[in-house]
């Protein structure tokens, strides 16, 4: 039995035989201090009592006046939902058990002499199960309500729900105070300007068509703010659209950054045009005339002029490449370090230097940019370090990769300068190769550092890589 401290259980007992009813009432109340029983002789009287809403359980015989217990169960379910219903009937009526179970009976107990303790247990269990079942949805609803409150309170966006007239029913405390806007439309909040009118038209479209609006950029001329808005239909349990759910993010800083990038790209494009045409064209003319003079003269000064012109051409190529790094957007895709290393090695002019790939790493990166990064690191080693082997591999923690050589290494006092634009230790170097490497890494939000390899050569580590 349950503790006496548990709440009382009020039982409605439908039994045509008054003697049996009174005997059962007395026995149940004796067996359990929690149970109180009200006997009624007919189903009709039982339904009237149930309408008062005072009962925790219905106990019913199967053989009743005017209907049977299963029919009464059906009426109880229609009128009072999931109130526990225990069918308590004579032995020999087992044939009705399956019918009662199909109708939704909570328990089926065969009446037997002097076994009221068993009946009391079954009634308490039915009530306890019903309370547990009802509490679980209530707890779940409460959890969902708390989660919804947290979403509206914590998300750093403007989150809102509107009805079919565009009035705000719920709104997060992010853009404006909810108390100032609930029950109002955008026009009432922001004024009847073009921004509010466009928002109202979008609301109508979502509500009338059921088609969502996803990531629409909007500009409010009144306050100079850019926003990114998504709106989806809000459906009720009947499948009808009750309004919409929307989320708006403020992207003014992002748009200003994009405009600044566009302005820089325009300047870079003009700069690249000057380099490509205004410098390269006369350089081509000069190189052509040097070739003609070589056919007429073996003056050694022509070789020095030709070498200087070749250096100028290399400088122009590197400057154009550096300008392109700042102009183009990064397009990260899953790439393979080993595959990119092999591809880059094919473009590097080497005689007896070997490539060693010490493992693979799959990560997100712009294929062409990472290829150029590897090419420049390999070329830098071949041209300045005189190595026998260049090794490419992943870092031990898979947060990046390295390019190392067994050549002459980098003097300690130069490590801080090697990525500086124009810095070179070679007579014919342009000082752009490692600057391009740094630009590519920065464009990916990576970090590139130079250190000493295990063999005493140079080792370049690229970290901050997102592996996949």
Image (cartoon, rainbow, N blue to C red):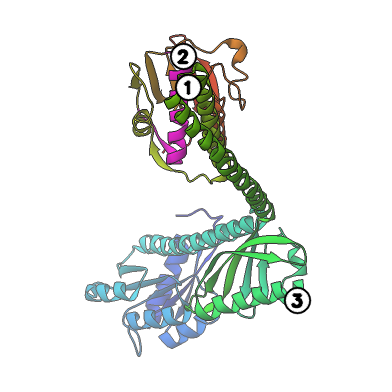
Say whether disc 3 or disc 1 marks the residue closer to the N-terminus: 3
Specify the farthest residue to the front: 296
Number of the label disc, if any, that sits on residue 188: 3
Residue 157, located in which quarter of the rendered image?
bottom right
Q: Quadrant of the N terminus?
A: bottom left
Q: Pointers 3 and 1 in contact (CB under 8 A)? A: no
Residue 468, located in which quarter of the rendered image?
top left
Q: Secondary structure at mark 2?
A: loop
Number of the label disc, if any, that sits on residue 385: 2
Viewer-nearest of discs 2 and 3: 2
Question: Disc 2 to disc 1, how far (Cα)?
Answer: 8 Å
The boundaries of the magenta stretch are 360-386
Q: Secondary structure at mark 1?
A: helix
| Residue 146 seen in the current view | yes
Identify the residue at image location x=50%, y=79%. 209
Say whether disc 2 or disc 3 marks the residue closer to the N-terminus: 3
Identify the residue at image location x=57%, y=60%. 142
* Neighbour tally class for label 3: few under 14, some 14-19, many 20 plus, Cα within 10 Å: few
């Amino acid at each position: 039995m349950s503790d006496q401290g548990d709440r009382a259980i009020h039982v409605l007992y439908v039994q045509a035989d008054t003697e049996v009813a009174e005997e059962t009432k007395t026995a149940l109340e004796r067996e359990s201090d929690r149970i109180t029983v009200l006997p009624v002789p007919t189903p009709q009287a039982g339904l009237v009592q149930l309408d008062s809403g005072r009962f925790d359980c219905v106990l019913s015989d199967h053989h009743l006046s005017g209907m049977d217990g299963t029919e009464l169960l059906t009426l109880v379910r229609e009128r009072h939902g999931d109130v526990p219903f225990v069918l308590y009937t004579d032995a020999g009526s087992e044939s009705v058990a399956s019918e009662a179970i199909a109708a939704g009976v909570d328990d089926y107990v065969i009446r037997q002499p002097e076994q009221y303790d068993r009946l009391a247990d079954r009634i308490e269990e039915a009530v306890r199960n019903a309370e547990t079942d009802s509490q679980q949805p209530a707890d779940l609803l409460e959890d969902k309500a708390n989660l919804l409150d947290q979403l509206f309170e914590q998300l750093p966006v403007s989150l809102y729900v509107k009805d079919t007239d565009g009035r705000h029913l719920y709104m997060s405390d992010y853009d404006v105070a909810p108390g100032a806007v609930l029950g109002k439309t955008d026009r009432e909040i922001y004024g009847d300007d073009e921004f509010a009118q466009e928002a109202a038209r979008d609301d109508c479209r979502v509500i009338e068509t059921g088609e969502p609006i996803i990531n629409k950029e909007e500009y409010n001329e009144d306050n100079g703010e850019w926003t990114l808005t998504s709106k989806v239909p809000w459906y009720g349990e009947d499948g009808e659209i009750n309004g919409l759910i929307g989320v708006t993010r403020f992207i003014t800083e992002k748009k200003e950054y994009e405009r600044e990038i566009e302005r820089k790209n325009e300047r870079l494009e003009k700069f690249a045009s000057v380099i490509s045409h205004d410098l390269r064209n006369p350089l081509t003319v000069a190189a052509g005339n040097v070739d003609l003079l070589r056919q007429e003269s073996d003056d050694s000064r022509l070789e020095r002029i030709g070498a200087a012109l070749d250096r100028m051409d290399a400088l122009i190529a590197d400057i154009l490449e550096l300008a392109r790094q700042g102009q183009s957007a990064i397009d990260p895709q899953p790439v393979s370090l080993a595959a990119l290393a092999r591809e880059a090695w094919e473009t590097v002019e080497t005689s007896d230097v070997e490539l060693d790939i010490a493992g693979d790493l799959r990560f997100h990166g712009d294929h062409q940019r990472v290829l150029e990064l590897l090419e420049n690191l390999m070329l830098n080693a071949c041209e300045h370090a005189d190595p026998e082997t260049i090794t490419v591999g992943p870092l031990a923690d898979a947060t990046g990769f390295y390019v190392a050589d067994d050549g002459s290494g980098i003097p300690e006092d130069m490590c801080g300068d090697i990525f500086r634009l124009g810095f070179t230790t070679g007579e014919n170097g342009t000082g752009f190769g490692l600057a391009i490497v740094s630009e590519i890494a920065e464009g990916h939000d990576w970090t590139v550092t130079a250190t000493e390899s295990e063999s005493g050569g140079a080792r370049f580590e690229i970290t901050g890589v997102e592996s996949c």
